[in-house]
Amino acid sequence: MTDAQQAALDETARKLFSGPIAFLKSAPQLKFLPDPVAPEVAFAGRSNVGKSSLLNRLANRTGLARTSNTPGRTQELNIFDVGAPLRFRLVDMPGYGFAKAPKDVVKKWRFLINDYLRGRAVLKRALVLIDSRHGVKDIDREIMTMLDVAAVNYHLVLTKADKIKASDLDEVTRATEAEARTRGAAHPEIIVTSSETGLGIDRLRRAVVDAATG
Ligand code: GTP
Ligand code: MG
């Protein structure tokens, strides 16, 4: 990308994320998804990793997506329209790997997430969020493999960077980069973020806009 293209992308991202962003609907099943009339970018990751918080921070609006200290807050696919007229959609998903949820609920969410990620034609990119304190877990690898097989592009995003020491953050970033290199559909660059401090948010906005409008 040239400097001029980069600047244009920055400007588009800034405009879109400071303009209209609105909750559209919740889809407990795929049949309730809106008509696939706009590109979509989805937030995936383990329960409590910070998906809904990151969506709010991207949109610069607290309380757009509901967040909680307790894992299992987001239980459906929540769709948000970006831009008026509509430019693209953000999709907040339930978390996977929530050990304390009832088995049938875990199964239901797993099918919902997998079916959406594998089958949604307008899905341009998934953001796979990884808690920087924990790094990539086997359950993340399962989702990554599923995305590799389905050839859905994804970006690995480290969350809660404010919670660990800089040296540990360097280490987990390097390890996550090494994971990404072994993956067919992963973007090689890892985006390190904090919804608390705003670290990496501009970078993530650019990646989202690039994926959705590029
Ligand atoms: P589920 O919907 O349950 O799957 O969770 P989620 O991935 O949407 O996580 P959510 O955004 O609800 O955040 C979970 C908890 O982590 C909340 O208490 C947030 O305030 C906290 N949190 C999220 N992001 C950050 C961050 O960058 N830094 C810190 N310190 N806390 C964060
Ligand atoms: Mg959530």
Image (cartoon, helix red, strand yellow):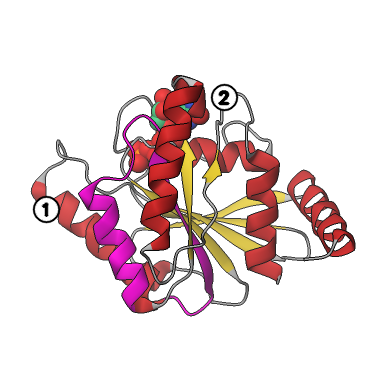
As displayed, is residue 174 above or below residue 133?
A: below
Crowd around label 2: few <14 · some 14–19 · many ≥20 (10 Å): some
- Real-space Cα separation, disc 2 to disc 1, in angstroms: 33 Å
Tell me, for residue 104, which label it has, or none. 1
Q: Residue 143 carries which label?
A: none
Q: Which residue is drawn at 29% across and 66% down?
A: 145
Q: Which of marks 2 and 1 is in front?
A: 2
**Can residue 15 be seen from the camera position used here?**
yes
Q: Nearer the viewer, residue 43 or 142?
A: 142
Residue 113 drawn at (x, y percent) = 32, 61
Q: Earlier in the sequence, mark 2 or mark 1?
A: 1
Where on the picture, by quarter, is residue 150? bottom left
Q: Is residue 64 above or below residue 10?
A: above
Give the residue at x 48% y 80%. Answer: 121
Looking at the rendered structure, the secondary structure element under dot 1 is helix
Mark 2: secondary structure: loop
User: Ligand 1 shows up in which quadrant of the image?
Assistant: top left
Please provide percent x and percent y for residue 104: 11, 53
Whether ligand 1 has any atom under 8 Å from the Cβ at mark 2 is answered as yes
**Residue, x 72% and y 66% (percent of image)?**
87
Q: Position of residue 116 (x, y in %)?
A: 37, 69
**Farthest residue, direction left:** 103
**Where's the N terminus, which quadrant?**
bottom right
Q: What stretch is highlighted in magenta?
A: 120-149
Mark 1 Cα shell of 10 Å, populated few (<14), some (14-19), many (≥20): few
Kind of residue sitting beneath label 1: Asp
What residue does disc 2 label? 196
Q: Which amino acid does label 2 sit on?
A: Glu
Comparing 210 with 41, the one in front is 210
Q: Residue 64, can we see it? A: no
Residue closer to the observer: 24 or 61: 61
**Residue at 52% over, 49% down:** 190
